[in-house]
Every structure is written in structure tokens, then in C-alpha cells.
Amino acid sequence: MDFQSILFNAINEILSPTTAAYALAAMGLAVHFGYTGLLNFGQAAYMLVGSYGFAIATINGWPFFGAVAVSLTLSLILTVVLGIPTLRLRADYLAIVTIGAAEILRYVITTTGMTNVTGGAEGISGFKGTFEAMNPIPEGTYNLGTIIINEYDLWLRITGWSLVTLVALLLFLLMRSPWGRVLKGIREDEDAVRSLGKNVFVLKMQALAIGGVLGSLAGVLFVLPRAVQPGNYATTLTFFIWTILLLGGAATILGPILGAMTFWVLLSLTQGILFSLVDSGLIEFMTVTQVGQIRFMLVGLLLMLLVIYRPQGILGNKKEMSFGV
Amino acid sequence: MTLASKAPTTLIRTMVFALLSAIFLAGSLALAPAALAEDGTEQTELESNLVVSGTLIADGVKLSGVSVRVVGADIDETVESDSNGKWEVAVPLKADYTISLDLSTLPSGVELVDAAGSELNVKESDWLTSTSTRNFRFVGAAVETTSLTDQILQRLVAGLIFGALLALASVGLSLIFGTTGLSNFAHGEAVTLGGITAWVAGTIYGMPFPVVILIGLAVGALSGFLQNRFLWTPLRNRGTKIVQMMIVSIGLSIVIRYIYLFFIDGTTKSYTGGLSGVIAIGPIRLTQGSMLTFFMAIGVLLLFALFLTRTRVGRATRAVSDNISLAEASGIDSGKIIQIVWILGSALAALGGILLALYRQVSWAMGFEILLLIFAAVTLGGLGSAYGALLGSFIVGILVELSALVLPADLKYASALFLMILVLIFRPQGVLGTKQRVG
């Protein structure tokens, strides 16, 4: 067993671009659920429009920021389509509708009839050129101590985590503003806020839009290190983001970031340890593929235990954790 | 239930009951589906871009709804060609695959050029790009395209069967919601449990069909009892909020699903129950299994309706579902009723799983794949109403099948979800639900 490589792999997850993407998506969900109390189970849909919007626009010759703007616009459209009918519904109805809408979107982009636009089941690749072209870092390999990466990977990490930091700062300012306090008011008691003359529906729409924009940015960041694959946007993605959010703390700024880091480190560690135990023949009752399945079981178990025993997460304050209904 | 609303709901109940009885009686007339083509159980978990695909064309006519089976490298998947005659299967590896055609699903008049050519091969060395295309060669002596009315009829019957299967799962989900307020995301896993039990008991141990049904019901009931006893009741007693419990059920669903995958791996399995013989009635062809599926489902649903309306416990269940405090005030032990609901709901879902295994195939995610359809059915009918769930299931089943006439086959589930969203916008309480303020 190679403990060092297992440990290094786990450490590398902390600052990986994928972790940054999940952190960003979880921050969006924090605005939805943590601060406003909206049960959005369709965060995967926001990531989907982000990824596909960016990839399709880039392939059709749009510049980098133009393509990102396409992603953001799509997320706003999705907010309107999703928000107007559902924000008046009871909390658990909202959950079912958002999860249903996310699945509809996934079916639509996967369908063979759309292959010309979305690549069907094969997805899209070859859209990294514009991002690569902006890279100021000279070509070469860079040693980060536990991992050696190329200039693209380094550029991606720097961009990703700068974005996460910037968003965290913005959210911090937003949530301590009067507007943010009204959002928390909606979470605690919608009717009370309404009786104070606030337009709860509009405020919820604004929250949904902001969280959705973050989700779609996360979608862009999520595909920069890989190809766009329709299978990645299944309900599992949403459930992972929920686990990350609840792990870190739903109504906190740093919770989603800490949650994403902890989540991926834990997964990498369990995967590495189990994998090497199987590989060295110490565990004989399962195969290497089954190790990947154990990972999912642990995620599910983690989600259950968190919600039951520590719904406020690592950083949260129990008084701030309201599950509504 | 208030006195004022009693008259119309009783009427609707009688109508639903009459409808079900009529369908059951129609059994002797033996109407059932032809378009039993297997639906592609999409394994989107695959981390590859690789696709085996092809187009079925006989003398320029595109053949839709033909079953194509791809076997090899850890997969065994059956898909149905779409309205353009196209089919494709995502595969995990650049490896050897065998593609075979289910000749019984070919339209009449269409034959293969070479009868032995019903199997084509993809070799590992054939993979140059991410797609391998293989086409069968047909002679369409006299290609008859099925008339639209025939197609509609066939789809309608297929929809009724699928609806009956969904109903078995959704009445349980609806009652659990009604009595405990929980939107149980792990209900799909109760369906899968039935399917897996059928495969283990029926296919591996070769037990006869009635025994398989009994074992499945018992396993389902036991799982419901254990879940309620060791998870949901303690949570309720802790005062866990409904939304919290919903997220717990999501976690539970992930855990159970991957436990299934751990033990039975990702390939689809088949369970025929020795009932794969084909019966042809007029233009309609169906297996004995799917015919039995339908009438069993309807029969059980009828019994369940009788239980709800004619027995003491059933009436108490409806009382708890309507208003738990009022029911408790009149001496009903709600804890006991909730336990019964969990046991019955899970047993019915497991039965649904066994029948779904007969109708389609067994896979680790078979229940999860139809979970959102079950939710759609329950929401359509009105959350918490058992009769609404029945009605909703048939609407969803028929819509899913009929939409395949106009939409590509891989979008047919989307249509049901879309309908659910529409209904929630215009009639949030569902078709049969009672109006209440939502938001």
C-alpha cells in the first residue's frame, strides 16, 4: 500500500478545479435553501445550462466572455421558467417540480434528435480553446508539492478559486445587507415578512436568480477540465451538492467551500484506502469497480446522518437551520 | 373529510372503482398490447462516450419500435428503434459486442435478407471512433406500416399496463405521504427490491411464479416494517421535520440503490417466470407475462380499494390520512396505522417490481428510473389521495406510451414530468385533491 500517494491524492482534491465548481454550485444552493429556505432540487439543471450554454456558444465561435454571458442568460431564463410557476407552491411541491424540470432538461439534451446541437448521448468536447488562449502562464510543468500539473491546469485552478473567493465575498456583503436579512426572514416566517409589506414572491425570484447564476457559473467551471457529458447532470449531481451544502453548513458563506473540500477529500481517502486494500488482496469480497459503488453508499449515509444528527453542518448555527414545513 | 365534500368524492370513488372493475372484466375479452418493445433502460452512469448504433430501414421504410439487443463487455441492453428507425446503446468499453434483433418485433412483411443474419458483431479492433454502426439488411416484401388507429390502440393498451404497474407503486407512496407527510424518495428502491427478488427467486432458483409473488410480497412487507420501525418512527419521535425526513429518504435511496448495484452489478437481467409465450389477438401481440401483469395489477388494486373502503383498518387508514389529530381523538392508534401503511405500501411496490420485471427487465436502478413518474402520478391525482394516485398512474402510463407516437422514444418520460408541472401550475391540489392554500 502506498500511503503517500493516497494521502497526496486526497490533498490534491482540496484545490482541484472540480472541488471549486462544486463549492460554487453549493454556494448557489446556499442562497436558495440556506438563506431563503427554497427547496431547490434542480441545481443540476442550472449547472447543465451553464455547461451546455458555454460549450455550444464557444463551438459556434463566441469569445470566452460572450459564451459565459450565454450561460448566465440561460440560467436567468431557467429561473423565470422555473420560478414563476413554482415559487407559489408549498415547499415539498417545489422540490418535486425542480427535480422534474431538471430531468426534463436532461432528457431533452440527451435525445438523439438534438444530436446536432447538444451532441446527444456523446456530449460535447473541444471548447477549451478560448479559455486556453487567455492563459498568461508560460507553458511548462509546475510542482505544487503534492502534484505536478501543466500550465492549463494551474490557470484553471487560479481562475476557479479566485472566482470562488470573489463570490464568497459578494455573498458575505449581500447577506448582511438589509436585503439579505429579509431573505432570512422569508426562510423563518414567510407570512410575517409578507405582513410587513415585502413582496415575498419577487424576493424569492431574486434569490433563485442569484443562486441559479452561481449554479451556471459552476457549470462552466465544471466542464473546463473535462468534456460535456449528459450523464453527469443526473439527479445524483444535485444530491451531491446538497450533501456538500449540509456538510459545510447551509446558512453560511464558508460552509459550501469547506463542505466541498471535506467531501472530496473524504471520498478520495475512502476510495484510495479501499482500492489499495482490494488491490493488495486484503479485502477479497469485492472488486475494484465495487469500490466506486461503496463511495456512493457512503455519500448517501453521510447525507442521512448529517440531516438527522447535525442539520446545521460543520460551521452552521443550529438556530439558523430551519427546514420549514 | 368534511361532510360537504363527501358527496362528490364518494361519487368519484365509485366511478374510479367502476372503471377499475370494468377494466378487470374486460380481461376476459383479452385486450392487451402489441407494442411490448423493451424500453432502453438508460445507463447514464457510464463514464464513456462509446455508442453502438444503427438504423433499421427496409426498402426505404424506417422501422420503429423494433427491439435490438446489445450484449458484451458487462452490458446486456435492449433498446427500441425510434421513429426514424434509429437505435443506439451506450457501451462502457471498446470491446466485442453482439447485436441481435428480436424478430417478433419486426412489422409483418419485413424479413431479414439472410435468416441467419439476425446477429451482427462489433469487434474490439473495429473501434476507430467512438461510434460503431451496424445495420441489418431487410427485404420488405410488402411493407405494411401499421395504421394510425392501430398504433394508437396498441399504445393505449401498453399505457394501461404500464399505468397499472405504476399504480401499484404510487398508492403506497400516496398513503405514506397522506399519513406521515413524507415524500418518500426511497420508494423506487422498494420497487427494485421486488424486481431483484423475482430475479433471484425466479430466474436463479427457478421457483414457480406464485411462489415468487409470495416471497416478493413478504420481502417487501418486511422491508416496509423494518424501515418504519427502525428509521421513520424514531425520527418522528425525535420531532424531525418533514423536509428533513425527505432528505433522509434521498440519502436512504442512494445507499440502498448502490447496495443493490454492489450485489447484482450494472447489467440488466431478465425474469420471464416461464411466461414468455406469445399470444396474438387480432393485430395485437403480447406475451403471457404482460397480460398476466396487467390483470394481476388490476386485481390487487381492486382488493386494495376494497380494503380501504370496506374494512375497519382501511377506514381508519383513510381517517388518519385525512386528519391525523381528529383520527387520534376518535380513538385510532395512528402509530399502528402508519405501520400498516408502510407494510402494505412497500409490499405493493415490491409486487409492482416483480410485475415490472416480467413486463420489462430487472436492473439495479429500475425503481429509481420510474420514481419521478410515480411522483408525477401521485401529484397529478393529488398528494395523499389513494384514488387520485390510481387515476394519476393511468394518466401517466397512457401519456408516456401515447407521447411516443409524436415524440422520440427517449423523450417519452419527459412528457409525463411536463404534464405534472403543468398540473401543479394550474391545479396544485391535483385532479382529485381537495383545495388548500399552498404558499
Image (cartoon, helix red, strand yellow):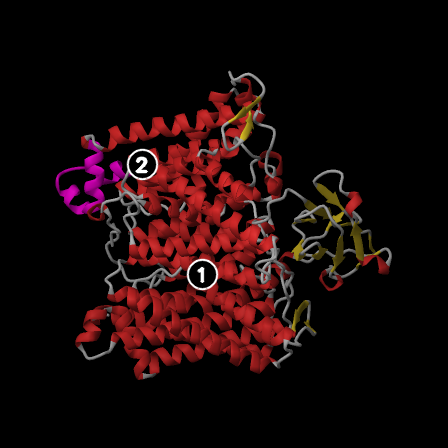
The residue closer to the viewer here, B246 or B17, is B246
Residue B24 position within the rendered picture, expressed as x and y whole percent measured from the top left: 51, 77
Using residue A69 as the reference point, say whether residue B105 is left or right of it: right
Q: Amino acid at mark 1?
A: Ile
Q: Which residues are magenta?
A: A179-204
Residue projecting furthest to the left? A196
Q: Quadrant of residue B301?
A: bottom left
Question: From this viewpoint, is residue B278 visible?
Answer: yes
The chain ID associated with circle 2 is A
Q: Which residue is mark 2?
A: A254
Residue at 64% over, 67% down = B270
- Rendered position, A254 above or below B26: above
Residue at 42% over, 61% down = B186
Question: From this viewpoint, is residue B31 visible?
Answer: no
The residue closer to the viewer here, B369 or A29, is A29
Q: Are the residues tagged 1 and 2 within 8 Å (C-beta)?
A: no
Residue B367 position within the rendered picture, expressed as x and y whole percent measured from the top left: 50, 62
Q: Which residue is mark 1?
A: B374
| Predominant SS of the magenta segment | helix
Other residues around mark 2 within 10 Å, as few (<14) / some (14–19) / many (≥20): many
Residue B160 position within the rendered picture, expressed as x and y whole percent measured from the top left: 53, 66
